[in-house]
Amino acid sequence: MASVKQDLDFPAVEIRPMHELDVPMVVAIERSAYQFPWSEGIFRDCLRVGYICRVVEVGSDIAGYGIMSIGAGEAHVLNVCVRDEYRGRGLARKVLLYLIDRARSAGMYEAFLEVRPSNTRAARLYHSLGFEQVGIRRGYYQATNGREDAAVLRRLLSPDAN
Ligand SMILES: CC(C)(COP(=O)(O)OP(=O)(O)OC[C@H]1O[C@@H](n2cnc3c(N)ncnc32)[C@H](O)[C@@H]1OP(=O)(O)O)[C@@H](O)C(=O)NCCC(=O)NCCS
């Protein structure tokens, strides 16, 4: 019998533009995934200003999303999130590879993102995709007991980098 992981492989998985109508579902996923989630307004602003906003669909189900801004040679991955029940099946990796590819095609030469050092799952994923720590933003994130630092990660996007 085919495994669930195989069942989720192409063609059942699709990355497509996020639309206004997707926002309520995206916000529901965001709230279930983060202790300090983005508001609905932030997602609507990302769409309004033309950030690259994508959802990953499994069948007709929104399983996750990725948001990135680009400009002045730099891409900033602002949010990557996968619904709990779809995790560990390579969907976040797929979204990130898609965003990296988009950034490179748009002529960006490097990509940045921030991650909580306590978010080891995400950090491991980013490192496996070639992101390396280039700095720390002190007290960047809201946290239960005050603030938490952010690790700033960068990946070069030269045409020959994977
Ligand atoms: C982080 C997150 C996006 C990963 O999504 P995902 O679809 O499960 O990730 P993938 O299946 O693509 O996994 C890719 C890599 O992530 C890491 N990873 C995934 N699940 C993991 C787990 N249960 N334990 C440890 N590492 C894990 C591994 O490095 C994995 O690589 P591998 O497939 O070679 O083992 C997801 O857990 C999530 O949405 N978390 C909440 C939101 C969040 O923290 N977003 C990132 C903000 S910076």
Image (cartoon, rainbow, N blue to C red):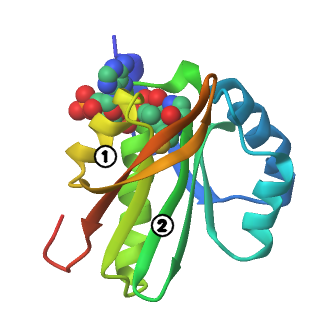
Q: Residue at x 41, y 75 (%)?
A: 103
Q: Residue at x 44, y 46 (%)?
A: 150
* Vertical placement of residue 102 versus 139, above or below: below
Q: Please name whichever residue, 35 or 16, is drawn nearer the observer in this view of the structure.
A: 35
Q: Earlier in the sequence, mark 2 or mark 1?
A: 2
Circle 1 packing at 10 Å, graded few (<14), some (14-19), many (20+), is: many
Residue labelled with disc 2? 76
- The residue furthest top is 1
Point out residue 92 in the picture as x, y percentages from the top left corner: 43, 41
| Residue drawn at 16 percent across, 70 percent down | 161
Q: Which quadrant, please, contains the C terminus?
A: bottom left
Closer to the camera in the image, 28 or 124: 124
Residue visible at 47% across and 25% down in the picture = 87
Residue position marked by numbered label 1 in the rendering? 126
Q: Dividing the picture into quarters, in which one does residue 132 lie?
A: bottom left
Question: Which image quadrant shows ligand 1?
Answer: top left
